[in-house]
Amino acid sequence: MLPPEILKKIKRIQLKTNYLANEIFAGEYESAFRGRGMEFEEVREYQPGDDVRTIDWNVTARSGRPFVKIYREEREMTVMILVDMSASLDFGTRERLKREAAAEVAAVLAYAAIKSNDKVGLILFTDRVEKFIPAKKGRGHVYRVIQEILSFQPQHPKTQIRVPLEYLIRVMHRRSICFLISDFLDQGFERALAIAKRRHDMVCIQLHDPAEAEFPKAGWLQWRDPESGELHWVNSSRPGFQKRFNELSQELIQSPQRTFQSLGVDSVLIDQSKDYIHPLLQFFRFREKRQ
């Protein structure tokens, strides 16, 4: 039996995200990912009216005549949502924790997917895969996705993003749309992300909280790393410490963004203290224009 406060959060997120998926994001998801569920079938000679973006330039160059690629549309797609459950997600200011923001974003994406008749699966991870829920359809399944993210108690506090990516590569053999939701306070996942991108349509959603870039000026403090458990004494009032802390905090945000850009992986940066609707809408519309 879930605690009343968790049930209240689940119901609130369910109502809000279901409304958003139907009213605000209606059609945005489908437009952004149209054509991603297409399988290559054959090439044929170009005919007047064909989309020039489908021209196969290699065959065209070899034959001396324009040829286009023909695709067969899949009837349904699979959406996998990978959510970081490490201890750093249990941080937040104002209204919610980063974990709650992750649950809301995941729920909007899941509702949008099932509205387009896609299946939705879930991978919860820390420095290992903590739980895998196979892809299914239906609003009841989305409710379970929200419930698992908010109520699941991970066994390990640390983060290793390469682990769920390697797991995804092993278990998902057909091309899927994959949303990876994390604060990306990790290193060494670049190779796994590059491989996953070749096999799946990867979208990285990076959560951050502005309070993570600020350290209170309160003299000597004992600070515990939430993931490693290590204790550190710091003089939080020293100007040199404040400057170095701000620099490191900015680098923790910018470094993953540079990685995504270098690998050509789509990404969304979300300030979890604000509403996530605008950055998600911007991303969907950017994807639609790029089609």
Image: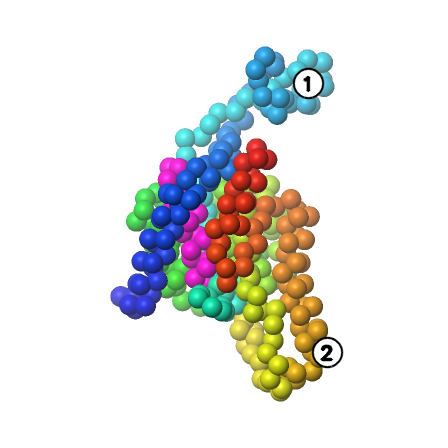
On residue 60, the disc is 1
**Vertical position of residue 253 compared to residue 46: above or below:** below
Q: Residue furthest left?
A: 1
Kind of residue at badge 1: Thr
- Would you say residue 28 sits in the magenta stretch? no
| Residue 260 in picture, x, y percent from top left | 63, 50
| Residue 160 in picture, x, y percent from top left | 56, 61
Q: CA distance from mark 1 to mark 2?
A: 61 Å
Q: Quadrant of the C terminus?
A: top right
Q: Residue at x 36, y 56 (%)?
A: 13
In what element is the residue under mark 2? helix
**Vertical position of residue 128 compared to residue 224: above or below:** above
Q: Residue furthest bottom?
A: 220
Which of the two discs, 1 and 2, labels the residue nearer the N terminus?
1
Q: Is residue 137 left or right of residue 252?
A: left
Which portion, as a residue range, is magenta?
99-118
- Would you say residue 106 sits in the magenta stretch? yes
Residue labelled with disc 2: 240
Q: Residue at x 58, y 21 (%)?
A: 51
| Residue 130 in picture, x, y percent from top left | 45, 60
Q: Depth-wise, is mark 1 or mark 2 nearer the camera? A: 2
Q: What crowding class fits label 2: few (fewer than 14 Cα within 10 Å), some (14-19), or many (20 or more)?
A: few
In what element is the residue under mark 1? helix
Q: Nearer the viewer, residue 200 or 50?
A: 50
**Vertical position of residue 118 compared to residue 87: above or below:** above
Q: Quadrant of the N terminus?
A: bottom left
Kind of residue at badge 2: Gly
**Vertical position of residue 224 compared to residue 288: above or below:** below
Q: What crowding class fits label 1: few (fewer than 14 Cα within 10 Å), some (14-19), or many (20 or more)?
A: some
